[in-house]
Image: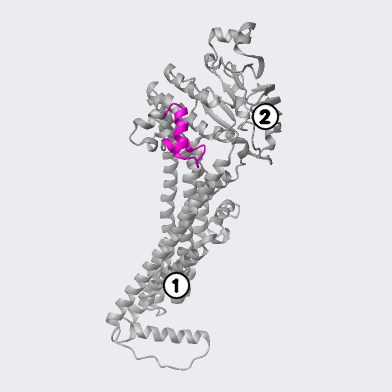
Amino acid sequence: MISKLTFGLFSEKDAHNFMRLMSYVKPFKGRIFLALLAIIGVAFTESYLAAFIAPLVNQGFAPPAEIPATQEVTGIINTLNNWKNQFNHMIWGTENKVWIVPIFFLSLITIRGVCRFASSYLLSWVSVVAISHVRRDMFNKMLSLSSKYHQETPSGTVLMNIVQMTEVAISNASNVFIVLTRDTLIVIGLVCVLLYLNWQLSLIVLLMFPVLSLLSRYYRNRLKSIIANAQASIGILNNVVNEVHQGHRVVKLFGGHQQAMTRFLDINQTIVRLGKKMVQASAARSPFSELIASVALAIVIFIALWQSQNGVTTIGEFMAFIVAMLQMLSPIKNLANISIPMQAMFLASDTVCQFLDTQPEKDTGVKALNQVSGSLKFENVVVQYTAENKKALDNFNLTIQAGEKIALVGRSGSGKTTVVNLLPRFVTPSAGKITLDGVDIEDVKLNNLRTQFALVSQETFLFDDTLLANVQYSRPEASEEEVLRALEAANLLDLVKQHPDGLQQKIGANGSNLSGGQRQRVSIARAILKDAPILLLDEATSALDNESEHLVQQALERLMHGRTSIIVAHRLTTIEQADRIIVMDEGKIVEQGSHIELMATHGYYAKLWNMNDVNG
C-alpha cells in the first residue's frame, strides 16, 4: 500500500513499523473518511479552477448564446455531455453572466477553503488524539521496564522517544497523508483537465513524472542516514541538558560551566551541521523540480504556439492549459519534497516501535502472599553484573528471622546494596534462590512481592507535589488523619503546623523546599504509612548532620518496631542495637554477631569500627 501511494519511493519494509502505529488511527476511520472527502473536494475545485479559464476567455467575452436544444439522449457519455452543455450555458451563455460568473468563481473558492479547513482540522484532531494514545502506551511500557533498563538508558533518550519521536511519527503521518492524497488527486485532476483540453500536449507533461520520481529516490537515499543521525543527536542533547539541570550544584561548585558549555556546543554544532545538510538538500531539490517542470512547460508552449498557428487549438484552451500546468507545479513540488518528512516519519516510527518492543521486567510469579511474617533466607546466591568479572555476591547464604533487625556492614563494593536490591527483585541472581516465609520470591507475583517491603534510602526521591501527596504515595487511599500520624511518627508534625498550607504545601522538585533531614523524614513517613512487614534501610542517615540524624534515628526506631529490618549502615554507631550485624567483604559474609560479640573477637568488624571506615 505504502509502495503504491509513494510510487515506489518507499518499500513496505521501510513502512513496517509505521503501519504498526497506524493501528492507533484505525478507531477514527469515520473522521478520516470525512477528511478524505474534503480532500477530494479540494482536488476537484482546484482542477476545475484551471478549466475555468477556457470558457471564461472563449465564452465569457462573447455575446449571449442560444439555449441548447433539449433532446432525448441515450448513453452515459451523451447524457453527461448534455448536462455539461446545459450547465455551461447557465454560467456562460446568458445575459446574467456578468454577475453569475463572479459568484460562481467565489463559490468555487469558498468550497475549496471549507474543504481545506475540514481536511486539515479532522486529520490534525486524529493526529493529536493518536499521539496521546501512543504516549500513554509508551509511558505504560516505561513503568513496566526493569531497573536495569532505567540505569543503562539515559533519561534524555527516554524523554525523546516518548515526546519527540511520537510527535514526529504521527504528526508527520497526518501531514504526509494530506500531501499525498490531496496533491496526488490535484495532479490527477489537472492531468485529466490537460487531457481534455489537449491530449497531445498532456503526453509531454506526463513524461516529467518519472524524472521527478528518480530525483526523489536520490534525495531519499542521501538523507536517510542524515535524518537518523539528527534524531540521535537530539536525544544526546536532551541528556546533556537534563544532566546539567539535575547536577547544577556540582557544575557551579566545581566551576564546570566551561565543560558543560563545551559538551552542549559540540552536540549542538552537530545538530546544526546535520540540519544544514537537510536544508541544503531540500533547498536544492525544489529548483531541480521546478526546472524539470519548466522544461516541460517550455516544450508545451512551443508546441501550443505551433498548433495555434495551424488552427488546432483556441486561445482560451491554450490559456487554460498553461494555467493548469502552472497550478500543477506546486503540488508536484510538494510531492517531490515529501520524502524528507516521510523518511523522518519512518525512522521515528522505528524508534517508537523499538521502545514499545523493549522486553518488560520479567514476572514469573504466580503466587500471592498474605499475612507475611517477614522471615528471609538467601541460599547460595550468586550475583554477577555483566560489565564486571568480579562477583557482587559469591555463594551468599543468610537466614533472617521474622522481626529480626539485621545490619549489613562492609567496605564500599562489598555487596551490601546488592543484597537489598535482590529482595524486591530489582536485581536477579545468577544462581541460588531467596525465600520469603519459605516461598521462593521468583514464584511470587512482582506487585504482591513489592507490597511486602518499604524502602528508605540515602538517595531519597520526592515528587514535585504536595507534602500530602508524597506521603500518600505509598498508600493512596490513606486518610489525612493517617498521614498526620505517620508524619508525627517521623518527627515531621512541626513542618505541617508551621506552614500556612499544612499538608497541602508544595515541597518542590525532589523536595527542594525542604532540608536534607526533612526530606529523609518525609520518606520515612511514606514508609510508615505503607506499613509493610519488611523494612529496607539503605544508608538512610549517612548524609545528615547530628541533629537531623538524631530525629531521623528516632523515626526509624519507631518504623522498625515489630518489623523485619535490613539496615545497610554507613555509620557504625547507628547499628549498635541491631540484633545481628553481618560483616561483608567481596560479596561474602566474613563475620556475624552482635556488636559486643564482634568487638570481643577483635576481627574485621573491630578493625572497621576503630578506623570508622565503612563507606556503605
Q: Quadrant of residue 294?
A: bottom left
Q: Which residues are magenta?
A: 467-492
- Return the residue found at the far left: 98
Q: Nearer the viewer, residue 131 or 563?
A: 563
x and y percentages locating residue 24 in the rendered image: 54, 55
Classify the position of the N terminus by image quarter. Answer: bottom right
State the image coordinates of residue 32 (x, y, percent, origin top left). 49, 63
Secondary structure category for the residue under label 2 = loop
Left/right of residue 327 with respect to residue 359 in the rendered view = left
Residue 601 position by quadrant:
top right
In the foreground, 542 or 87: 542
Residue 136 is covered by the magenta coloring: no
User: Dot 1: few (<14), some (14–19), or many (≥20) neighbours within 10 Å?
Assistant: many
- Compared with 430, 276 (above or below) is below
Residue 596 horizontal side relative to residue 158, left or right? right
Q: Which residue is mark 2?
A: 429
